[in-house]
Image: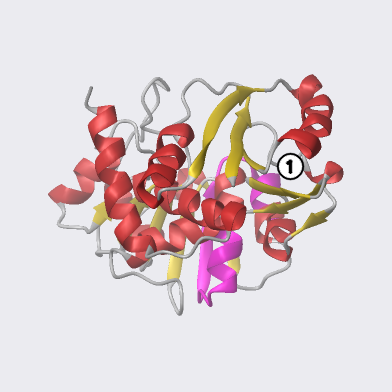
Amino acid sequence: MSWKLTVIGDPIGHTLSPLIQNSMMQKLGAAGKYTACHVRPEELPDFLRKAREKLDGFNITIPHKSAVIPFLDAVDPYAESCGAVNTVCVQNGKMTGYNTDGDGIRAALGRMGADFQGSRVALLGAGGAARSICRKAFDCGAEMVRIFCRNPEKGAALAGDDTRAEVLPFAELSAENCGSWANILLNATPLGMSGIGQDFGDFSFLDGGKPFVCDIVYKPAETTLLKECRKRGIPCKNGLDMLIYQAIYAYRHFTGAEFDADEMADYLREQVEAYLQK
């Protein structure tokens, strides 16, 4: 079989998904091609109609992760709880949606020796990525998720009615209620990302403890947050592993292929890092 796969978004020029997925297919000896497709919001219904006939699957990035759901024939329970889909499988004209972001962050943390089970999680941000992470943390037995955000309504939506969630204003980030409290600290905001022009104004919230820190930003590879963590001897990593693992789990949904995810992640990391250094 020759797989016909793509990723859609608006914008889409920045995506690394074709590099990752095509490298994976080449490594596994699979036939097919993975492309990127610029789909504006008003073009989404037409794209989905054509996808039923012409594609075996596709990934979804901003701004379509929630908008696509009403058009699907079925949605995985975890993706439904997130209110977001990043992977769609097409079989016999039927489309099923999944979300692999949560498994991506869990695997990335696992490579650091961290686990949501029984952990206190400080989650910075309340956007789409944060929602997927929060739901996965709850599903995996986190003791508490403390959500720091600028929009209290988004934070409340993230927490839902789960008594293990606590929402605090972003301005209340401090050593006392974050760095010294958390076992895991996750930055799900764009702060520090290349081209954004915004960063954390103060990093004292890292003080007082040594939580595992994961920044979902991967461009630049070394954000100021990670630099500040290293100064303090705090174990940390950028978002590249999350990106790679979510792609691996998406590929498994598309193809049903079984392979060692960690070995594949190591291979893909080499490919992506070489590309980013060009």
Q: Is residue 126 visible?
A: no
Q: Is residue 80 visible?
A: yes
Residue 41 drawn above or below residue 82: above
Query: Residue drawn 60% across and 38% down?
Result: 5
Q: Quadrant of the C terminus?
A: top left
* Quadrant in the rendering for residue 245: bottom left
Horizontal arrangement in the rendering, residue 262 relative to residue 134 (left or right) = left
Residue 130 drawn above or below residue 8: below
* Quadrant in the rendering for residue 68: top right
Q: How is the image coloured?
A: secondary structure
Residue 248 drawn above or below residue 228: below
Horizontal arrangement in the rendering, residue 159 relative to residue 218 (left or right) = right
* Quadrant in the rendering for residue 211: bottom left
Q: Nearer the viewer, residue 132 or 28?
A: 28
Q: Nearer the viewer, residue 21 or 129?
A: 21
Crowding at dot 1, Cα within 10 Å, few <14 / some 14-19 / many 20+, comes out as: some
Horizontal arrangement in the rendering, residue 40 relative to residue 21 (left or right) = right
Q: Which residues are magenta?
A: 133-156
**Would you say residue 141 sits in the magenta stretch?**
yes
Query: Residue drawn 73% across and 67% down?
Result: 161
| Secondary structure type for disc 1 | loop
In this figure, which residue is indicated by the disc labeled 1?
Answer: 66
Residue type highlighted by circle 1: Ser
Q: Nearer the viewer, residue 96 or 148?
A: 96
